Image (cartoon, rainbow, N blue to C red):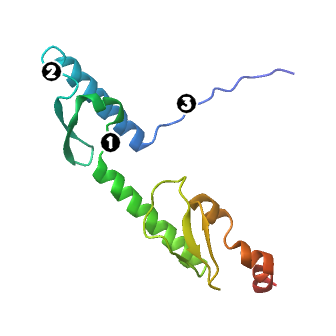
Amino acid sequence: MSITRTQVKPMQKSKHALEREELMALAERYRMERAAESSDSAEAGWQCGRGHAWDDALSAVQNVRCMNCASQRREQLLERLRALAAERGGKLVSADYVDAGAPLEWECAFGHTWEALPADAARCWCHECARMGVYDQAVG
């Protein structure tokens, strides 16, 4: 009996991670070019892969992010969460999405409201309906 080793493929980076790395590399090059003549508070021009442009301090090189793209991603996620709630006959009550760690307010088809993280709401819908057996009655 022989044992063969399988080669593990490296994980592919997301498009956003690659874009961020590219921005960080650009910032580092720019900072090195200007190091002799500028201070950390000097402004630099940035542009993301989607063409959004902005000015930010060179000291922000480790945290270069396009705020336009970030707000678009938040809005797209809110739309997906609203669609999830609508699929289940409920609605997303919260108007704003902060981040994955901030709970949102939800309402089921029977008017029960609760707060849950987006990932938790996707896995398990209304706890009150589950306790009352509403889902079992609908299926059975």
Q: Are marks 1 and 2 in contact (CB under 8 Å)?
A: no
Dot 2 surroundings within 10 Å: few (below 14), some, or many (20 or more)?
few
For marks 1 and 2, the one nearer the N-term is 2
Residue kind at label 2, given as amino acid type:
Ser
**Label 1 sits on what residue type?**
Arg
Which comes sooner in the sequence, label 3 or label 1?
3
Residue 123 higher or lower than 137, as above or below: above
Q: How many marks?
A: 3
Q: SS at mark 3?
A: loop
In the displayed orientation, state which residue is furthest to the right. 1
Instruction: Determine which residue is flagged by label 1.
Output: 65
**Residue 49 in the image: above or below residue 118:** above
Quadrant of res 11: top right
- Relative to 33, is 69 on the left or the right? right
Residue 2 place in picture, x, y as percent: 82, 20
Q: Where is residue 101? Give x, y as percent.
A: 55, 52
Q: Position of residue 59 (x, y in %)?
A: 27, 28
Q: Position of residue 50 (x, y in %)?
A: 26, 49
In front: 109, or 22? 109
> Relative to 131, does residue 4 appear above or below in the rendering?
above
Q: Which residue is mark 3?
A: 10
- The residue at which mark 2 appears reads as 38
Residue reaching furthest left? Answer: 37
Label 3, label 1: how far apart the Cα atoms are: 25 Å
Question: Which quadrant, please, contains the N terminus?
Answer: top right
> What SS does tag 1 mark?
loop
